[in-house]
Image: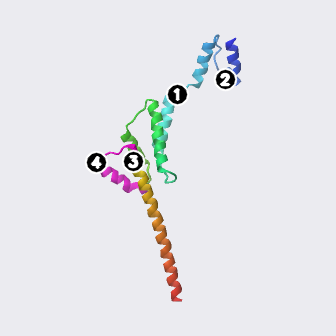
Amino acid sequence: MCLMIMKRSVPEVFRGSISKSQNAKGFLDAVEQYFTSNKKADASSLLAKLISMRYKGKGNIREYIMEMSNLASKLKALKLEFSDDLLVHLVLISLPTHFGQFKVSYNTQKDKWTLNELISHCVQEEERQQREKTESAHLASSSQETYHNLGQLEV
């Protein structure tokens, strides 16, 4: 009776592909095999995503690094662990070229950063770059105004 109820609750698409079990346990085992994820495939997919990530300079760098850390945690749960040092290097590699000076600064230091230290330094560096960009835009804007005003004086 239980087997009949279980078979009716499974979508028809699956019924034909599941072996014709004579008992409920055999039926459940067959269903489980169809829905068990392949851990190697999951690990491979997560690892590919992690190593192909690139920070595009849009959004929050802290969230970006936390997303990388989250992927590393998922890999750890799948028994594919790597050190925080490796994760720090993966983050640094994924940063765009305008972080070049920042990367050189890290590589010339004797101390290694933890992931939290890296996040803190990256946030500071991103804020510094945004300030410089704003200042240079303001400088360019005021230079154009000065040049424009000089042109009006000569007329």
Circle 4 packing at 10 Å, graded few (<14), some (14-19), many (20+), is few
Task: Give the magenta range.
Answer: 98-116
Confirm whether the magenta stretch covers residue 111: yes
Quadrant of the image occupied by residue 76:
top left
Residue that mark 1 sits on: 38
> Which sits earlier in the primary sequence, circle 2 or circle 3?
2
State left or right for residue 45 relative to residue 3.
Answer: left
Location of the C terminus (image quadrant): bottom right
Q: CA distance from mark 3 to mark 1?
A: 33 Å
Confirm whether the magenta stretch covers residue 125: no
Which numbered dot is residue 14?
2
Residue that mark 4 sits on: 110
Residue that mark 3 sits on: 118
Q: Position of residue 74 (x, y in %)?
A: 48, 34
Query: Which residue is found at the position 51% from the left and 77% from the top?
Result: 145
> Which sits earlier in the primary sequence, circle 4 or circle 1?
1
Circle 2 packing at 10 Å, graded few (<14), some (14-19), many (20+), is few
Query: Which residue is found at the position 48% from the left and 69% from the top?
Result: 138
> Which sits earlier in the primary sequence, circle 2 or circle 1?
2
Q: CA distance from mark 4 to mark 1?
A: 41 Å
Q: CA distance from mark 2 to mark 1?
A: 19 Å
> Which sits earlier in the primary sequence, circle 3 or circle 4?
4
Query: Which residue is found at the position 41% from the left and 49% from the top?
Result: 120
Q: Position of residue 129 (x, y in %)?
A: 44, 59
Question: Looking at numbered disc 3 in the image, what kind of residue is underneath it?
Answer: Leu
